[in-house]
Amino acid sequence: MPLLGKPGRLTEAEYEVIRTHPRVGSRMLAGHHLASLVDAAVLMHHETPNGKGYPLGLAGNDIPIDARIIGVCNAFDAMTSLRPYRKGMPHDRATNATWRSMPQRPG
């Protein structure tokens, strides 16, 4: 059964497989003449401001802006999409959750 369609929570081993997709995607792009335009976003779109993301554990401004943008879009899509194990979150609730997760800026 495909992991993305699995009903219920993933095991730790299954989650580790899922966590390989940024590196796999980056390798798939390797050699394409336009890869340099998107490679950082593909590789780092699951990095988080607090450094607890993957695959590199980058934090804050060490994450390229394009990867941060795609990461926010990906998180919003994940929250609002129907999954075999849960309903999608309403857009207003997902928007609020997204804003709450953003690092606070001084001043």
Image (cartoon, rainbow, N blue to C red):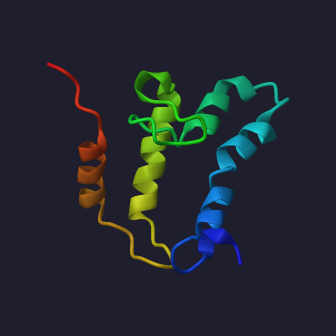
Looking at the picture, does residue 104 appear above or below residue 13? above
| Residue found 68% across the figure and 58% down from its top | 17
Which residue sits furthest top? 107
Residue 77 as seen in the image, left or right of residue 44: left
Q: Locate residue 99: give its quadrant.
A: top left
Residue 46, image x and y in percent?
53, 43
Looking at the picture, does residue 36 appear above or below residue 74? above
Residue 85 as seen in the image, left or right of residue 56: left
Residue 28 as seen in the image, left or right of residue 61: right
Task: State the count of labels.
Answer: 0
Residue 18, image x and y in percent?
64, 57
Residue 29, image x and y in percent?
77, 36
Quadrant for the N terminus in the image: bottom right
Front position in the image: 93 or 7: 7
Looking at the picture, does residue 77 appear above or below residue 47? below
Residue 77 as seen in the image, left or right of residue 32: left
Which residue sits furthest right? 31
Residue 10, image x and y in percent?
57, 70
| Residue found 50% across the figure and 38% down from its top | 47
Front position in the image: 97 or 55: 55
Quadrant for the C terminus in the image: top left
Which residue sits furthest left? 107
Q: Locate residue 101: give its quadrant.
A: top left
